[in-house]
């Protein structure tokens, strides 16, 4: 299989960072371009990720009035937060956070010598957003990280990776 274009899904998590490094490793030898996709979702966001976005990208991360109570996945090089270490944020802040995540990923890829062709950011179910970007971009391969929950727990939890695998026919590399 010749790789000419990759689609990389990113949410700012440590697993997405590993997927980015893997995508860069695949793109570099062939000169393939990478398109990035990020889904804006509801729910709590890790306070560490909000602090990163505020400090590194000037994102206004003011919280909504209600505190978060649900568990959220780990983000970036920032560790895995517990449910008491998350915050509900406004839709505008989520959008700005998504832009910061895409900017950071684009900058990292450029520093690794990889061309970023396009970036996509949509609100909705991450698997559906990734599937739509895959249909639009028609990449040679889609790359995304996984939280490594295992196949049984992942299916029960409805993992994004499992959903993506079932939603399109493009070769997909899931990076643990």
Image (cartoon, grey):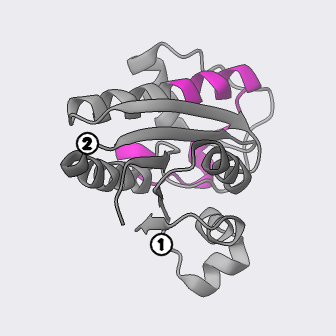
Q: Is residue 168 above or below residue 157?
A: above
On the image, numbered disc 1 is attached to which residue? Answer: 148
Q: Residue at x 69, y 72 (%)?
A: 166
Image disc number at residue 31: 2
- Specify the quadrant that holds the N terminus: bottom left
Instruction: Find the distance from the CA under tag 2 to the CA under tag 1.
Output: 29 Å
Q: Residue 39 location in percent, x, y?
A: 65, 41
Image disc number at residue 1: none
Q: Is residue 136 magenta?
A: no
Q: Residue 98 location in percent, x, y?
A: 58, 30
Q: Residue at x 70, y 35 (%)?
A: 122
Please say if the residues under marks 2 and 1 sit with CB atoms less than 8 Å apart.
no
Looking at the image, which residue sits at the far front? 2
Q: Please state if 65 lies on the left or on the right of 133 as rendered.
A: right
Residue 159: image quadrant is bottom right
Q: Residue at x 43, y 28 (%)?
A: 52
Q: Residue at x 34, y 45 (%)?
A: 77
Q: Please state if 97 lies on the left or on the right of 31 as rendered.
A: right
Q: Secondary structure at mark 2?
A: loop
- Specify the quadrant that holds the C terminus: bottom left
Q: Secondary structure at mark 1?
A: loop
Q: Residue 112 location in percent, x, y?
A: 21, 36
Which stretch did the figure color magenta?
75-99
Looking at the image, which residue sits at the far right? 66
Q: Is residue 89 above or below residue 142?
A: above
Q: How many numbered discs sit on the rendered protein? A: 2
Q: Please state if 75 lies on the left or on the right of 41 as rendered.
A: left
Q: Residue 152 location in percent, x, y?
A: 62, 87
């Amino acid at each position: 299989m010749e790789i000419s274009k990759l689609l990389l899904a990113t949410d700012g998590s440590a697993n997405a960072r590993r997927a980015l490094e893997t995508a860069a490793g695949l793109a570099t030898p062939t000169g393939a371009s990478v398109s990035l996709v990020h889904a804006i979702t509801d729910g709590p966001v890790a306070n560490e990720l909000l602090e990163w976005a505020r400090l590194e990208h000037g994102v206004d991360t003011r919280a909504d009035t209600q505190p978060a109570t649900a568990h959220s996945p780990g983000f970036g090089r920032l560790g895995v937060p517990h449910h008491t270490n998350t915050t509900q944020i406004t839709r505008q802040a989520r959008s700005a956070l998504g832009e910061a995540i895409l900017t950071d990923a684009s900058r990292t890829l450029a520093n690794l010598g990889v061309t970023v062709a396009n970036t996509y950011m949509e609100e909705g179910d991450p698997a559906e957003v990734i599937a739509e970007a895959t249909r639009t971009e028609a990449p040679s391969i889609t790359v995304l990280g996984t939280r490594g929950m295992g196949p049984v727990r992942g299916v029960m939890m409805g993992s994004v990776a499992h959903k993506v695998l079932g939603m399109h026919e493009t070769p997909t590399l899931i990076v643990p």
